[in-house]
Image (tube, grey):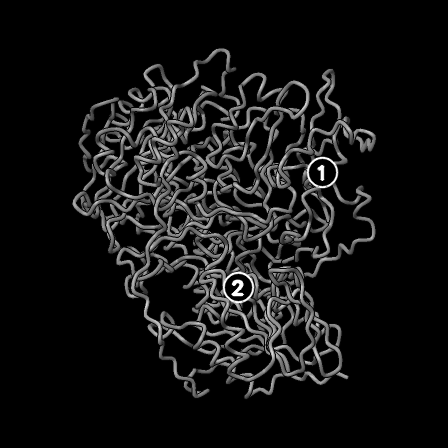
Amino acid sequence: MSPASVFVCLSLTLLSDYPVIRVKPDNSGVVTDGVKHSMNPFCEIAVEEAVKLKEKKFIKEVVAVSCGPTQVTETIRTALAMGCDRGIHVEVSGKDYEAMGPLQIAKIFAALAKKEEASLVILGKQAIDDDCNQTGQMTAALLDWPQGTFASEVTIDGEKVKVVREIDGGLETIKISMPAVLTADLRLNTPRYATLPNIMKAKKKKIANMKPADLGVDMVSRVEVLRVDEPPTRLAGVKVETVDDLVAKLKANGTI
Amino acid sequence: MVLPYLLITLHCYISPYKSHRCIRALKTVQAEHAPPQHYTWRRNCSSAVMPRITSHYTIFPRDKDPRWEGVEMERFADEADVVIVGGGPAGLSAAIRLKQLAKEQEKELRVCLVEKASQIGAHTLSGACLEPSALNELFPDWKERGAPLNTPVTEDLFSILTEKYRIPVPMLPGLPMNNHGNYIVRLGHFVHWLGEQAEELGVEIYPGYAAAEVLFHEDGSVKGIATNDVGIAKDGSPKDVFERGMELHAKVTLFGEGCHGHLAKQLYRQFNLRENCEPQTYAIGLKELWVIDEKKWRPGRVEHSVGWPLNRNTYGGSFLYHLNEGEPLVALGFVVGLDYTNPYLSPFREFQRWKHHPFVAKTLEGGDRIAYGARALNEGGYQCLPKVTFPGGMLIGCSPGFMNVPKIKGTHTAMKSGMLAAEAIFPKVTAEDPASKTAGLHIPEYEDNLKKSWIWKELYAVRNIRPSFHNYFGLYGGMVYTGVFYWILRGKEPWTLKHAGLDSAQLKPAKECTPIEYPKPDGKLSFDLLSSVALSGTNHEGDQPPHLTLKDDSIPVANNLAIYDGPEQRFCPAGVYEYVPLETGEGMRLQINAQNCVHCKTCDIKDPSQNINWVVPEGSGGPAYNGL
């Protein structure tokens, strides 16, 4: 009935809370120092789904995993406060962290899922700072597991998972066998608040620490960011009185 | 639990007339601003239907609300030795000092600190020129610990501005504005660093959790605080994710909410702490951070000005500090005393137009604005200090208000007050038998310590400078007074001048005043309000009751708009208050855009009807200042 023993639910800390973003003076990236980071909203939904599945007794254990510098432990604590049983922090900092992209993260998650013998890996569909939407899919490919992405409804049915996916044309329902990778979309659930008593209790839950090298993962990036620029400032619109004026302006502009 | 607000007035016009749905004026209003559909009421002697604005449980208690029947209201409670409300310089210094003493004397002490911002420093805003006196006492090795005091003051300029020109005033040593030996800091970063030091010492810091309620023992002493409930919908009903806040009980609770704290406001009434002092008087400070052209950058330079664009009877002035943190950054801002009389005055627009003065514009030309924020600050000083201890708790920092107004510095005194509080508390909370008459400890030694410290001497010496502005010559009279009595006589004159009274009572009716013509923002040096608010990074969970609560929903239109032309639309630096035409019928209604709020507290201070009561929204909401 309940085969899922370890449930790895992955969350990433990201720029969130609608902060003010600006480009670094050398155009190499955006300023992240001092900007508030918090759990990616889609990952919150993923954690909530995992905890709900545990509450419904489909799975036994929920493990929250994240990669990044020490700040990331706060995010793992929030996940623990929401109901996860234990956490794993894969330490990546400095230059490795700046170069870290979906492929490296997927390699780490895949290695961990294999090591911990997870039955289900749930992630948020995409991170709201880079909007890549790649990590879940890459993890599934590396593990050669089936994937149910953009999930708006998840039901466990014996050894299989029924996933209702949000796609451009509407909703698609698929049935995939476990172990599988799922990515959470917006309407999957409404995440619970991490209340203060739970945050205090979460301090007692274990967070294991490891490095990518311990998992045999090579962090070298095949992507190089050449330049980051702000979007061009929007020019003021011009109002014209007549259609002739409009045509004249468009001609003068070279548009027609 | 005891609901503290004694002035709950259940509006007699409210009745859930479901038949009035057809004339509801709210259908066309955007969803996020639409007050609940079933609580419209008829305004007396008018055909207009006014939508209900306030739904917060502090105005409409939940025990009488049928939607809350059967909802579990039990709260989880935990015990600490000391609970501190507010993670600013005062709260953190108190926490650090307590843990330092615990380490020295090898005693165990549980110190918990709650802070409404999502991270420590996110709601901190100040100029700031930090006087390192208190920091030197707290951490003599602050430099080795990496405190972000990177910009020693190198140049100090003071000017009186006229519309086109600048009159330089020599910054003689001994004048309160002299900054020799001080550091220009980004206070948000400094507070963040203090938070890290506190955590290292073992203080339990909980950002993102606001203290919403004060708890009392049976004997009336303070028992602790309760954090905010979450998951209440905009109309005041419980959502699926509703969770009760948590109770933190302590032997002593320190309240360091900063200027005009909402829990402190309640405590003043509860314990009659203000019976022997003048009502506090305030100013609003607006601030921006700019990255300027490198050629114009003079790291370490401090510039202050008074005069234009304010008239001589409106207290206020500007600051512009050149930071030295790698890139050419300047912190600049404008302060306007909230005892101003003209309801047409807009502190935000005075700030924007000040930037066009040739002396200021030349620094900013070619630069980019990267941050904006605003906060109220204390101007009362010595005359407005309340009693700061009461059974079970004490007030620290800008909450009671230790700011040295002519120096425009309050951080060093706030830190020192936190440290003195810690030193007074420590022996009592670690004693075997605290020998207290009340369950919550009353520690009057804190007030004695304050009176013997340099805080008191400093505030006493400058006590007459701010009130000296209340004379016919306004600013100029004040400057003469400062020159004679402070610079020469060091504040030793035997008299103590009084302030003008409550700030909210100073506004003259609109018909007696002239509207001020403000220039349109040019988008390069001056900007409009909404783009500024966007830069503050402020946001709140949309589906929660507005935290700007009105004791009486009808008063804004009946009083504020009718007599004073709605000054809240001008003094709010975040565009929270708007008078918009009613969708049907004649007249206006007040629209509260609570999500814009930057937690400055100006509305609670300046509302001429004193009808607005600012309460804390769900934790983590509010501005996201980064080193302001």
- Tell me where residue B177 sits by quadrant: top left
As helix, strand or loop, the secondary structure at mark 2 comes to strand
Q: Residue at x 34, y 56 (%)?
A: B137
Q: Residue at x 33, y 73 (%)?
A: A95
**Marks 1 and 2, how far apart at CA:** 31 Å
Residue B265 image label: none
* Residue B409 seen in render: yes
Judge by depth and name the residue closer to the eye, B499 or A244: A244
Residue indicated by mark 2:
A39
Vertical relation: B201 (above or below) B326: below
Q: Amino acid at mark 1?
A: Pro
Provide residue A215's location: percent of width, then percent of height. Answer: 46, 87
Judge by depth and name the residue closer to the eye, B558 or B32: B32
The crowd level at tag 1 (other Cα within 10 Å; few <14, some 14-19, many 20+) is some
For the C terminus of chain A, the quadrant is top left
Judge by depth and name the residue closer to the eye, B133 or B560: B560
For the N terminus of chain A, the quadrant is bottom right
Please state if A172 lies on the left or on the right of B314 as rendered: right
Q: Amino acid at mark 2?
A: Met
Vertical relation: B436 (above or below) B313: below
Vertical relation: A56 (above or below) B70: below
Residue indicated by mark 1:
B36
